[in-house]
Image (cartoon, rainbow, N blue to C red):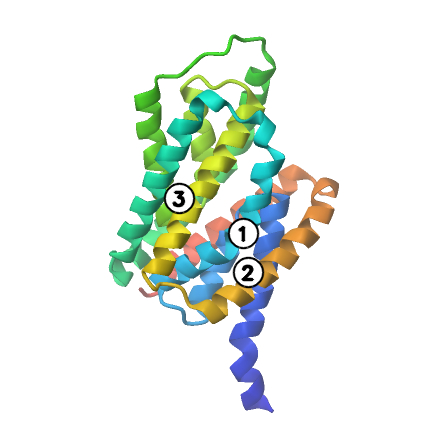
Amino acid sequence: MISSLSTHIPYIWLVAASFIAGGMNAMAAGGSFISFPAMIAIGVPPIQANATNTVALWPGQLTSIWALRTDLRRDLLTVVVSAAILGGIGGAIVLLNTRPRTFMHIVPWMLLTASLLFWISSPISRWLRLRSDTPHELRTPAMFPLFCALLVVNFYIGYFGAGAGFLAMSVLALFGVEEMNAINSLKVLGACLANFCAVVTFICGGAIIWHYCIISMVAAGIGGYTGAQYARRLNADVLRAIVVLIGCTMAAYFFWRPS
């Protein structure tokens, strides 16, 4: 009996972590702070853990694109889409060719950076909304510099991705995209495409552990649906604080954990 339970503990932990991750993504963000360490904790090698986690959580991003389609700026679609495709594939390829030990040395720094980005995103998001409410003329950004900046962000999405949504929004704002709905819709489109390209690259590279991936995908989907029901009832600042605390805790764990 005890032996049977110990055999199933990794699956039970993965289901629980993926459910929580799906709920976090629906209510705020930062689900990878839970689901990626869970993959590591049950013994999945780091590169495969990151790839499997990306595939498992990606379907939850799809529904947002359709909902935001009317807010997309058509004049920027070519730049956003091309940067997402090239960056997502490039980041995924580099990940697959990174030594596991090197990746594990980078992980805590990426988790810490993503947590800090998420922490400072609240005041900057408020600034973006205030800026968006100010009457302005529709301006076309310098396309090639915007493409280069988004390429770097999407490369990071293909490689790891946590906290990248805020980076994409900041880049778009810095290049003169002022309307908040346009910024958000372009961010969602770019992130979803970059992650899709990473997903395809990971699958072609044989980096997915499918039995863990399917379990995580189903649990995250249920968690996302459940979290969406409560998202509007919970205080956004409290949610943000919880996500930042979890991210910093996971970063501290990986700094402490022998690589």
Q: Residue at x 39, y 53 (%)?
A: 200
User: Which class describes the residues within 10 Å of circle 1: few (<14), some (14-19), or many (20+)?
Assistant: some
Looking at the rendered image, the disc whose residue lies closer to the viewer, 3 or 1, is 1
Residue type marked 3 = Ile
Q: Name the residue under label 3.
A: 157
Q: In this view, does 107 lie above or below 168?
A: below
**Mark 2 and mark 1 in contact (Cβ < 8 Å)?**
yes
Gap between marks 1 and 2 measured at Cα = 8 Å
Q: Mark 2 points at which residue?
A: 217
N-terminal of the pair, mark 2 or mark 3, is: 3
* Relative image position of residue 215 (x, y in whole percent): 55, 67
Circle 1 — which element? helix
Residue type marked 2 = Met
Q: Residue at x 28, y 51 (%)?
A: 93
* Relative image position of residue 186 (x, y in whole percent): 49, 30
* Relative image position of residue 118 (x, y in whole percent): 50, 39
